[in-house]
């Protein structure tokens, strides 16, 4: 939005889904899957988006990619606003914005060879001649650590980690600027996760890529992310530089989230204080006049239930009245 360092900008994004009101006369409700998310994704960085299941992380990603229609808000890719574009007008921008999916077993067409899978985006965007495509596909296979001799094989002949490498090669086929990684290692074994994370970091340096990395594994996010945003009930409740957030979490929800994550040192693990959340788990189909975390918060005050706290701070921002800027 005027700043050449901002690759992707999301402003007050809301994605609501109407429910109920069917032939049985049920009450009409609205699920507020994403309820006012804002962040900037800077060139060359990795912005991690974390939170428990159902907090709206994947819906945010799908809205950015145009797979879900935003209810309101703005999404900017560089200087171009893309949230209001039709599928046809969105087509040129899809080259700059690609996705690596969560499930490497479901995201690849089992009836297509690896060569066809990786070259398909090039065909859609009319890149290269058929001969050049074969050369580029072989280069991409080598880039992601797979033997180009495997090009004529089918997805079922590969392991989960190898399939995810194929998915990465497909995403890179059109030379994107931004990659959205939606739980892209969560379906893999731990040892394979490390390999894929290291590959993504290597590709970022070599190709000047920018990542929006969505995950629920806090250790993975800490390893790969430059900055981190913590989501709760469709909103970002805390955001900061990665090490700052992990070393000095300010929001009570972030503190509880980090306290539940295991650490590899047994002595440190034994000394850590766990924060056990109690109270009613909030529902995304309710409108909360105050902080949505109030019913579970260990430091809640009366004012927290009547007015929503803004996301404030200098660099390290947290949406909590009891947090000092």
Image (cartoon, rainbow, N blue to C red):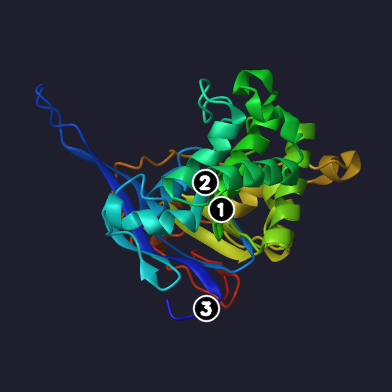
Q: Which x, y percent locates residue 278?
A: 53, 39
Q: Quadrant of the N terminus?
A: bottom left
Q: Which x, y percent locates residue 200?
A: 70, 49
* SS at mark 2 in the image: strand
Q: Is residue 313 left or right of residue 194?
A: left
Q: Which x, y percent locates residue 253?
A: 56, 51
Q: Is residue 270 left or right of residue 207?
A: right
Q: Earlier along the polypeptide chain: callout 3 or callout 1?
A: 3
Residue 278 appears in the picture as rendered: no
Q: Residues within 10 Å of mark 1 (few under 14, many from 20)?
A: many
Q: Is residue 175 left or right of residue 270?
A: left
Gap between marks 2 and 1 measured at Cα: 5 Å
* SS at mark 3 in the image: loop
In this view, 1 is above or below 145: below
The residue under label 3 is 4
Q: Is residue 226 left or right of residue 67?
A: right
Mark 2 touching mark 1, by CB under 8 A? yes
Q: Which mark is residue 179?
A: 1
The residue under label 2 is 99
């Amino acid at each position: 939005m005027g700043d050449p360092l901002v690759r992707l900008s999301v402003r007050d994004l809301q994605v609501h889904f109407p429910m109920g009101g069917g032939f049985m006369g049920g009450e009409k409700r609205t699920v507020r899957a994403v309820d006012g998310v804002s962040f900037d994704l800077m060139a060359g960085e990795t912005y991690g988006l974390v939170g428990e299941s159902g907090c709206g992380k994947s819906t945010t990603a799908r809205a950015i990619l145009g797979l879900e229609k935003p209810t309101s808000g703005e999404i900017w890719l560089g200087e171009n606003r893309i949230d209001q574009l039709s599928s046809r007008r969105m087509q040129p921008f899809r080259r700059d914005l690609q996705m690596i999916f969560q499930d490497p077993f479901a995201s690849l067409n089992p009836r297509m060879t690896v060569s066809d899978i990786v070259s398909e985006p090039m065909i859609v965007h009319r890149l290269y001649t058929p001969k050049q495509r074969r050369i580029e596909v072989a280069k991409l296979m080598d880039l992601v650590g797979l033997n180009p001799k495997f090009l004529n094989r089918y997805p079922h002949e590969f392991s989960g980690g190898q399939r995810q490498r194929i998915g990465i090669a497909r995403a890179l086929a059109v030379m994107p600027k931004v990659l959205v990684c939606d739980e892209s290692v969560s379906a893999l074994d731990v040892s394979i996760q490390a390999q894929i994370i290291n590959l993504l970091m290597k590709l970022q340096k070599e190709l000047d890529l920018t990542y929006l990395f969505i995950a629920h594994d806090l250790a993975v996010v800490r390893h790969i992310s430059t900055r981190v945003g913590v989501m709760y009930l469709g909103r970002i409740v805390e955001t900061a530089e990665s090490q700052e957030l992990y070393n000095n979490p300010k929001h009570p929800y972030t503190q509880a989230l980090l306290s539940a994550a295991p650490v590899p040192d047994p002595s440190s693990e034994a000394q850590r204080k766990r924060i056990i959340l109690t109270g009613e788990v909030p529902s995304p189909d309710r409108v909360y006049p105050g902080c949505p975390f109030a019913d579970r918060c260990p430091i809640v005050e009366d004012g927290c239930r009547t007015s929503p706290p803004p996301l404030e701070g200098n660099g390290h921002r947290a949406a909590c009245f009891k947090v000092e800027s």
